[in-house]
Image (cartoon, rainbow, N blue to C red):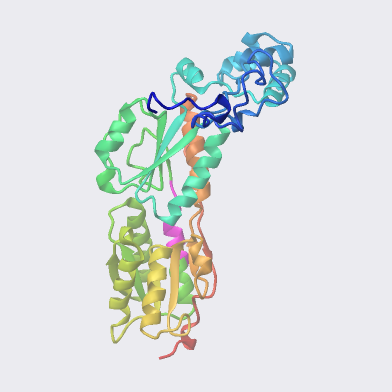
Amino acid sequence: MRASEPTPPAAEQPPSAARPPAEQPPSAARPSAARPSAEQPPPAESAAGTWPAAVRRPTGRDVARLAGVSQATVSLVFSGSEAGSRVSDATRERVRAAARSLGYRPQAAGRQLRLGRSGMILLAVPNILGPFFGRVLEGVHEEAGRHGLAVVVSSGWGSATLAEAATTSRFDGLLICSPDDSQLGELPTDTPAVFLDADPGTDRARPTIELDVAGGMRAAVQHLAGLGHRRIGRLRSTHSAYTFRVRQAGFERTAIELGLDVVELGVSLNEGQPAARIAARRLLERPDHPRAVICDDDVVASGVYQAAAELGLRIPADLSVVGMDNVPVAALLAPPLTTVDLPGEELGRAGAAALAGLLRGERVAPLSPLATSLVLRSSTAPATAVAG
């Protein structure tokens, strides 16, 4: 504004951009900070660029006051150590009830420093996108939560990265699921670890929880043979993991015992359905293609469905298909897939429970392989009904 221009009256001055008149009354009408007024707007309606004041978190002292105990008693109840057992059940419940009513949560960092732990465990799986490992993770999460442990899941790891994870303080222990041979290496002897769906000879100093995959494969072969199929196709995994070697051995042993003719092709499970579809087409385009196929997992079986549709083959009228894993997609295929159920959730729960025992300094007793079962659906039919 030029000096020669008169200054406009105060009432005509434009409001400041930072202080809209609707939200900033004259100072005389504004309530003081020391004496809040009902007319003061709530924090959410405060000036732009500000946030509501942080709500004070309840403390252990608040819980102690409400429960009528000492602060030391509150600390014992939430310590997560054996010292907490010195508090009577009635007092412990009174403290926990007070904590719930106040919304109190013990500070994890302080507890971890006292116990020398992070409160986290690592679940290492070969392929985080594999639907079977989702079932395992569900079981691990469920059981780990009972022991106050958080779970981090990782895939694509090698022996070096796993050893590095074992030597840091980020994880209290490791769950290593269905490892490929290239992913196995020396772990520090003081690292709590449990192997899942792995070779029990991998590390005899650590627990291994197996699945009876050989028994599941035997049931699948016997089912097709019982339907009259004498020539069976097999889409097997090309990976060097112990679990797939056991499946293959179970298949071969049963096929030989039953005198079956077998046609096999390898497929990379990590490449998913596209690779399975290509392998299935190679198998089904043969002039003498088998009229029944067993797959190493349900994703491969879904690739067989796709290839069969492209070649005009009907399931099960022209082709019987059996998978393995029993992941959710198996029941959604049309027709629903007959498959071997591998109890992934039970495997995860058993692994997390064993690891929690190791973290408590307990000796973990060996477990028998977890039972598998054949789930009969609509993807298989008697060989006599197959179009020739």
Residue 20: give x, y in percent of width and height.
Answer: 55, 32
- The answer to whether 256 appears left or right of 7 in the picture is left
Residue drawn at 47 percent across, 46 percent down? 137
Which quarter of the rendered picture does the C terminus lie within? bottom left
User: How many numbered dots are placed on residues in this image?
Assistant: 0
Residue 127: give x, y in percent of width and height.
Answer: 36, 51
Which quarter of the rendered picture does the N terminus lie within? top left
Residue 44: give x, y in percent of width and height.
Answer: 60, 32
Is 25 or 65 nearer to us in this picture? 25
Residue drawn at 29 percent across, 72 percent down? 278
Please, is residue 369 above or below residue 186 in the view?
below
Is 368 or 318 nearer to us in this picture? 318
Is residue 74 highlighted in magenta?
no
Please, is residue 86 above or below residue 356 in the view?
above
Is residue 218 highlighted in magenta?
yes
Is 309 or 223 nearer to us in this picture? 309
Residue drawn at 50 percent across, 29 percent down? 16
- The answer to whether 20 appears left or right of 158 in the picture is right
Please, is residue 356 above or below residue 134 in the view?
above
- Residue 267 visible (yes or no): yes
- Residue 185 visible (yes or no): no
Q: Residue furthest front?
A: 4
Residue 330: give x, y in percent of width and height.
Answer: 49, 66
| Magenta stretch: helix, strand or loop mostly | helix
- Which quadrant of the figure has residue 78? top right
- Which quadrant of the figure has residue 310? bottom left
Magenta residue span: 210-219
